[in-house]
Image (cartoon, rainbow, N blue to C red):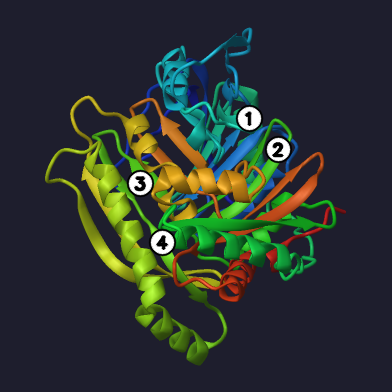
Amino acid sequence: MSFGVRTEIGANRIGSGTGEETGDGAGTGTGAGAARTVAVGEADPLPLMARLAGSGLFGDHVVYERPGRWTFAGGVLGEVVLEDGAVRTRWDGGETTERPWPGPASAALDEAFRSCPFPAWNAYGWIAFEYASAAAGQARGTRLAHLVVPRTEVRVEAGVAHVTSVDAGEAERVAALLAEPGEPPVGTPSPVDVRAGGDRYRSRVAEAVAEIGAGRYQKVIVSRRLPVPFPVDVVSTYVRGRAANTPARSFLLRLGGFQATGFSPEVLASVDAAGTVMTQPLAGTRAFGLGADRDAATRRELESDPKEIFEHAVSVRTSQEELYRVCEPGTVQVTGFMSVKERGSVQHLGSSVSGVLAAGRTRWDALDALFPGVTASGIPKAEAVEAIARLEEPRGLYAGAVVALAHDGAMDAALVLRALYSDANGAWLRAGAGIVTGSTPDREYEETCEKLSSIAPYVVPLD
């Protein structure tokens, strides 16, 4: 594989906007730097992203895929880290500033990015599930969010790789890397057994069903953590897993020593610069990829199962109610109601809910309204989050979000499911199922196995 390289020296354009379904922002320069364009033609962007992530040029990096656009964000020009007791910010190699945040978590992040000194910027990173309870002072984890403004950004779309950097030499090295022939080597997967830990999970489901019967809540997502028994090559796992999945979003990240990769089945929140917001709840699940006849049969079962239909309908209703709180009256609408979405090893019932933010409302209000995703928490949300805190160990990034932000007010947030996680203590997978009145422990356990099978067969050991 060989690409033509066209070089443009000048002011870099770190800000390029993050809107996708609902529009696009546009950035201006952050200072002296360099821009490059590399014509990639019909080349698959996936190996290009893998080459950048595995090149060693960047310690911290984030890959974020949306339909028609792949972005690699490498290095750290600015950084925002939100923890239980403090928010830390660092801009352009300066000193780290740390201060307490007594108010809502979203207000802490909003204020942190308002202090960004660059006239235009994009930021990428993640938000933990426990961010949801942080505003109420209930956060149990240590790190709630980690986002960076990259030093170098590569955006691949329409057959062209756009390279922007504050470092001209780094832009040259990245452009040269993209122009190299061939594809990077990818390791061989060692499938992870998804059927471990069933008894404990079934008992949690039974406990949740009893609590629903007692009227404590309507629905809760109960998940299980599956350790991976070997060190993982996260980049190769991303390549192998992405080739086998059809996600709404995909991501690969390494920030502060924590790594994750995944194939998000749904958009949690997409906000464009004009204030149009969209969420995409998926609820109701059956296996997929079993052959044409069996897939058709499970699809018919999914579309006619009262339990699955109820689970989806209440999730869509909840998403509507959440957007009513932050959108202009009369603008909230549902499209594609209960259509079937094929996501790797599973298929879901899916709908899109959208609206226009009311005057004075921002992306942070939209995130507050929608986070955590109803399809990964439960109904009512506050009671479900409290139940999850009792029934499970802290989730961290699982059921949180990988996020892209822009200076113009745009946001794109993918719900983190179907993912692999890795830190200094090891690697793990995680999956859950929506528990309602009609749930049975055996069926919900099988659903977690189906979901884990979107990534477990593609985990690559580290050489």
Q: Secondary structure at mark 2?
A: strand
Going from the N terminus, do you reach mark 4 or mark 3 first?
3
Residues tagged 2 and 1 counted as in contact (Cβ below 8 A): yes
Q: List x then y, in percent, for residue 115.
A: 45, 12
Question: Which image quadrant is residue 61 in?
Answer: top right
What type is the residue that disc 3 sits on?
A: Glu
In the image, taking residue 82 as reference, residue 303 lies left or right, namely left
Question: Which image quadrant is residue 443 in?
Answer: bottom right
Residue at the extreme left: 330
Task: Give the Cα distance between marks 2 and 3.
Answer: 27 Å
What type is the residue that disc 2 sits on?
A: Phe
Q: Can residue 160 be seen in this snapshot?
A: no
Q: List x then y, in percent, for residue 251.
A: 57, 48
Task: Give the Cα distance between marks 2 and 1.
Answer: 11 Å
Q: Which residue is mark 1?
A: 143
Residues tagged 3 and 1 counted as in contact (Cβ below 8 A): no
Q: Which residue is mark 3?
A: 20
Task: Give the Cα distance between marks 4 and 1.
Answer: 27 Å
Question: Which image quadrant is residue 187 in?
Answer: bottom right
